[in-house]
Amino acid sequence: MADRDALTGLVRPPIDTPRPDVAPLLLGATWNPDLARRVGAAFGDRHAGGVVGVRLDQAVRDPRLGGNDLGHAEDPLLAARLAAAYLFGMNGACAPVITDFDRDSCRRRNFTARALHEEELPVYRAVFETGGARGLALPWQLFDEQPTLIRRLIQDGVRPWSDGRAPVLLAGDGGDAVAAVKSGVDGFLATGRVLDELVAAVADGRIDEAEITAARSRLDELYGHVGAPSGVDHDGLASAVAREAVVLLRNDGLLPLLVGPGMRVAVVHPGRPDGLPDAVRGMIPDGTVTVAGGSDRVLLREADSRRALVAVGDQLRLDVSVGDNAVFEAIEWSRHVFELSNGSCRQMVEVVPASDGTVTLRYVHNGQLAAIDNVVWETVSDGAARAAGVAAAADVAVVVIGDNGQARDRENLLLPDQQERTLRAVRAANPNTVLVVLSGRPYALDWAEANVGGILWSVPAEQTATAVAEVLFGERSPAGRLPQTWHRGTDTDYETYLHQRGEPLFPFGHGLSYTTFRYDPPVLSAPTLEPGGRVTVSVRVHNTGYRDGEEVVQLYTRQLTSRVRQPVRQLRHFTRIAVPARGSHTVTFALTADDVSFFDVTTQDWVLETAEHEVLVGGHAVRFATDGVEIPIRQLSGMSLLCSRSDETAGLTLVDGPAMAATAQRSWLALRGCDLTGCRTWGLVTDNPTRVPLYVGLHLDDPKGPLIGVLAVPPGPVGAHTATITGEALGVRDVFVVFTQPGLRARRLTFG
């Protein structure tokens, strides 16, 4: 029987997770997996020798959420290929362990099993299948919340993806260590309490020796890895990433800037210039560069009092002494969130307006939330006006906007009011205005897109200023591409390009060049794709301009016929190529059956559906067919199915059971294209943790469509509840189960 010494190997110290050298979103803009591999190799060399933690986010979903720059892209294929290449590059020097599994994969409010498999898990699957990731460390709290899902993730995910070699560990404090081991967890990044629990469980037979042996084997392989630096020279890598990531969003011919003797350039930046003015000076040695901040200078005083807000060291406080230390530079990085600076004091504050015209300042000091009420915000110097004055005296104005890297959620994607005012004032003063966006998230730039001649975007990094300056003055032609959609200010749907029906401001994959490219129509090797087969797609790309350039060739498909709703389009292959001026390059992709298969919720497996498709590349569309399977219509009469196997949901999140929890009024789940013939009753297996009865409606065609049944669920534990279905000749319809109020946790849906 396993002794205490053997069990000790299952409890390990916490794994260090160093901050990445390059923001994943910056790599996403390069669309270059080989560059991601080189960045990973450099990171691995700096942390060579043993186990190293790596934060890995799945594909970016909602750009309003904080930490947007921690994901590589909104597309699962692009994100997966970049993440896999990055970790594969690390692997020789160290043993990468994913230490920050994105728990929002389980908590998203529109959860479906299909979205989980097609959009959330591909990144994790890729890093294990390619051998880049050596293990996975999950928050113990997540296991306590979702033991069923984590057991499935281990048994159906990590184990087969890694050929059974990668261990799964739990980090932090949690509940039942024995239940975790029985679910497939191999080890714990925890305290000695866990070891005592495991010893007792082995002694009384709750854990058997085979489970301990298998876990020890996986952990010993991970912690026995001895890595060494690759010896590769990584000089110039930061510059290469920055240069390939610059995206030209708009150009009416203003860019690249023409350099002449005595050229005058105004650089307007909301905060510290971060090297861009110096980089611009390097491009125009015979010219002049003038810098303007664009931020306001404000006096903050207490209403009906002589006291003003002053900086005392690194603190803010109200004082009767009013002098230079009472005037602050106020930089608005996000709406109503300012950085106040004065000498050694630099403080982020949230400005909350009150009905009487005063404001409340909320901020964190020494780890504690603090607030100053009844403050009058008085602008003593308008940053937009100062910036406009500088711009009017220049030949060209370069306005820099963006964020300061804080992982803060936002209500929308509008620019902070101060940055919007400054941009408009500068553009009014000088029509030769270029906008440079340096941020880890998209913005709704509707006005700028219509009024500013040139717009560039990149993510702030070590060499970003130099790379942007090179593009501004034409030393390099931009070839970065957007790794996520940029929405309009009027958008209320922040879906990724896979599901967005409207026209965005700048689409996923968008990016302009200083040359022009033309694509010949793609040529397919066969009109039909068979199971297990492949169709090659060849396309010739012509550089029709007069300077060399790089192009990112993107191949999408669209499924035209299906039993279920399909993405508007989906990226299947991409490659970054260099094409000389007036030259051409032929690119060939192999489109396989796996590429166009999707996760079918009825069979809980990947299927190739018999259907019509289109290949979309370079503005051309060519049809082809797949010879797969016909997915049968679901016959609902007499059926009992898990609610987590619905086709679509809104306002529902996955909780343990598994069950679907309603989180908002009129949350719903949908079953598409179902045959209701013979159905007389319907019901739910659910609990109601509230104190009042909750009601559920059964609708046809739409969440507000014809109502054919109402279910009342009284407060109480899990139980079966049924109601009668009304209506005649129901036939094949879309069925919606609508939860009128939040609270229910529905496990099964039944029809009789």
Image: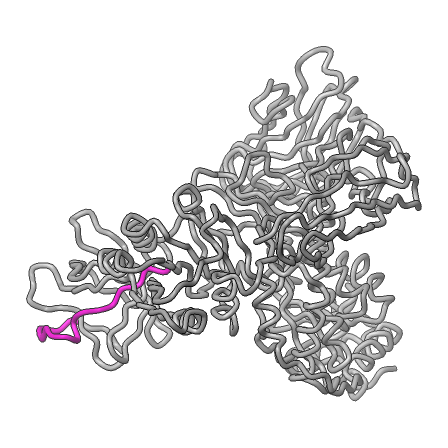
**Residue visible at 70% across and 57% down?**
580
Q: Is residue 520 left or right of residue 210?
A: left
Q: How many marks?
A: 0
> Is 613 rendered above or below residue 257?
above
Q: Residue furthest top?
A: 728
What is the x, y in percent for residue 87? 72, 70
Q: Residue at x 55, y 56 (%)?
A: 247
Q: Is 138 located above or below residue 53 in the figure?
A: above
What span is in magenta? 318-333
Which x, y percent locates residue 420? Answer: 34, 51
Residue 690 seen in the figure: yes
The residue lying toward the viewer, choosing from 733 and 67, is 67
Q: Residue furthest front?
A: 261
Quarter of image, res 80: bottom right
How far across and down, in percent of the image, does residue 242 sit?
57, 68
- Answer above or below: position of 730 versus 171: above
Is residue 645 inside the magenta stretch?
no
Quarter of the C terminus within the rendering: top right
Q: Please report the residue visible at 23 percent of the width from the left and 73 percent of the height from the top.
A: 316
